[in-house]
Amino acid sequence: MSGPLEGVRVLDVSTLFAGPLAAMFLGDFGADVIKVEHPRRPDAARGHGPQREGVNLWWKTLGRNKRTVTLDLSQPDGADLLVGLAERADVLIENFRPGTLERWNLAPERLHAANPRLVVARVTAFGQVGPYAGRPGFGSLAEAMSGFAAITGEPDGPPTLPPFGLADGITALATSFAAVSAVRHAEATGEGQVIDMAIIEPILMMLGGQITAYDQLGIVQERHGNRSVNNAPRNVYRTADGDWVAVSTSSQSIAERVLRLVGRPELIDEPWFATGHERAQHADELDDAVGSWIAARPTAEVIARFEQAEAAIGQVYDVRGVMTDPQYEALGTVRTVDDDELGLVKMQNVLFRMSRTPGDIRWTGRPHGHDTAEVLGELGLTADEIAALRARGVV
C-alpha cells in the first residue's frame, strides 16, 4: 500500500522547524520530498539537540523521508537549478525573510512562469505584509505575542514559554493542511498559488474564543496554573508513590463520578456544581477533595479506581513513561527504524493511521547533500557537470 500523497513532489527550501516539519508530514504520507540546503551552511536544525558520535538525533526524525540536495540559491546557477526542480514539483516550502527569494530572482512569479500549478508556501514569523514583515523571528515570539505565554504558568509567576517548538509545530500542521488544500485546487483548475503562513497566527487559533470573549465582554484571561476557568476539578495531583496524575472533568457526568469516587457526593448537590464555570470558582474546595483522596493512595490503585468509575485520568509521563505505556504500544506510536549511521533508531511514528493508504517512515534523516547527484541527474545533468558545479560552490 502506498501513501495518499504518492506522486506529489515537494521542495523543502526551509530551515529549522515549521517548514521542515510540514514537509516531513507530507513525506510521511507518500510525497517525494527534496530537501534543499546551502552547500556550506546546512539547515541549522542539524545542530539542535543531542548528538551521538557526531550524528544529530533530532534530524533523524525531522529529515526522514526526504532526499537531501545542496544548492546555493544566491548564485544564478543555483537559482536556475531550483527553477528546474520547481518545474517538476507540486509544492515549494520556504521560510526566508520576505524579499529574499525576490533578491535571488526566485520570486513566485518566476516559479509560476516555469510551473503554473506550483504551490508556494511561504512560512515566516510575521507574514509577507505589515510593519513586522521584515523582522527576524522564531516560534518563541509567536508563543509570546499570541497570548499563549500570558495565560501559561502559575498565577504569581511569570509568563511561561513552552520548552519545545509549540508554535512551530502548530504552524507545520497548518502549512501541511494548506499545501494539500492548494494541491487539490491545482489538480482541479491547473492553478498554483502562494500560501502566506505567519507563525504568529495558527497558535492564536488554538487558544480558543479569547478574542470573541474580549470583544463582547472585555474579558482578559489570566494565568491559573494547571486549573481551568471552564471546569473543576481540573489539575495535577500527587499520589502516595510521588507520581503525578492529571484529572479533567470537562463533562458534568464525569465531574459527578469523580466526586462520588473520592467520597464527597454531597458536593454534587451544591447549586454551584451544576456548570463547569461555576465549579471552577470553587476549585480550592474541589482540589482539596480530589487531591487528598489521591494523595492517600498508590498510583496503580488511583488509576484503577478512576477507570472503574469511568472517570478521566492520565499519569504525567516523562519520555520513559511514553516508551513503556501499553496504549502507546498498542497504537504503534513509537516506531523502530533502521538507520545507516546509527543502526536501529526509535522515533515517533506518522501522525495518524489510515486503513487503505497509511503513511510510512521509508528512511530516516540523511546526511547533508546525500542525494545531490541523484536529484540533479534527474534534471539531465551529467556527472561532469555536477562536478563542475560542486567545484564552483553551487552545489
Image (tube, grey):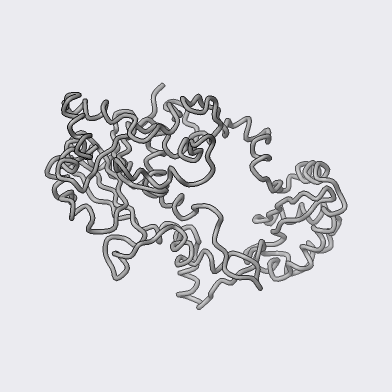
Image spot of residue 212 (x, y percent): 46, 69
Of 381 and 150, nearer the camera is 381
Image spot of residue 162 (x, y percent): 55, 57
Does 215 sit left or right of 40 as displayed? right
Position of residue 213 relative to residue 297, above or below, is below
Q: Quadrant of the N terminus?
A: top left
Position of residue 88 relative to residue 288, above or below, is above
Q: Quadrant of the C terminus?
A: top left
Image spot of residue 242 (x, y percent): 80, 50
Q: What residue is rendered at 33% in x and 28% in y?
A: 6
Does 55 sit left or right of 226 as displayed? left
Of 269 and 319, nearer the camera is 319
Position of residue 359 relative to residue 288, above or below, is above
Q: What residue is rendered at 79% in x and 56% in y?
A: 259
Does 378 sit left or right of 31 as displayed? left
Does 1 sit left or right of 390 as displayed? right
The residue furthest front is: 391
Q: What residue is rendered at 18% in x and 55% in y?
A: 103
Position of residue 95 relative to residue 39, above or below, is below
Count of numbered badges drawn on the protein: 0
Quadrant hosting residue 131: bottom left
The residue furthest top is: 1
Image spot of residue 194 (x, y percent): 24, 51
Quadrant hosting residue 98: bottom left
The residue furthest bottom is: 218
